[in-house]
Image (cartoon, rainbow, N blue to C red):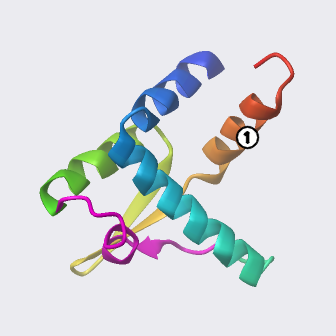
Amino acid sequence: MTDSDTLARAFKALSHPNRLAIYHEFVRYWEQGREASIDEVPAGCLLAEGIKRLNIGAPTVSHHIKELVDAGLITTSRQGRQMFCAIEPKMRERLRMFFESPNA
């Protein structure tokens, strides 16, 4: 898969308003964690905590999370009944580089 294909999948996933809001919430959490501790990237935020502020119905959240995972934007892990999500730092960097490129 080319870099253009990878970015297109990410942009397609982020084209839905709910997925964009979810991703933005995770990015916000990740950036707060980086500011708090430069040496550690947060292991992930508890999905329920990140979503409760977004006014998104619970039945659709898992679908949106799956789309973000499939696009390589986030990763998930479970601990018992709780799900944690984390930003995929390599994809975050690819997106940053795309938007900062003079050819974008």
Looking at this view, is 20 or 87 the one in front? Answer: 20
| Residue 42 shown in magenta | yes
User: In x, y percent, where is residue 15?
Assistant: 42, 32
**What is the span of residues highlighted in magenta in the rendered image?**
41-57
The residue to which callout 1 is attached is 96
Look at 73% across and 29% down and name the residue there.
98
Residue in the image at 24% along x and 55% along y: 61
95 to 26, vertically: above or below: above
- Asked if residue 11 lies left or right of residue 66, the reply is right
Kind of residue at badge 1: Arg
Percent across and percent down for residue 101 are: 83, 26
Q: Circle 1 — which element? A: helix
Residue 103 picture location, percent across and down: 82, 16
Q: Is residue 83 found inside the magenta-colored segment of the image?
A: no
Which residue is drawn at the image coordinates 18% and 51% (left, top)? 60
Quadrant (top left/top right/bottom left/bottom right) for the N terminus: top right
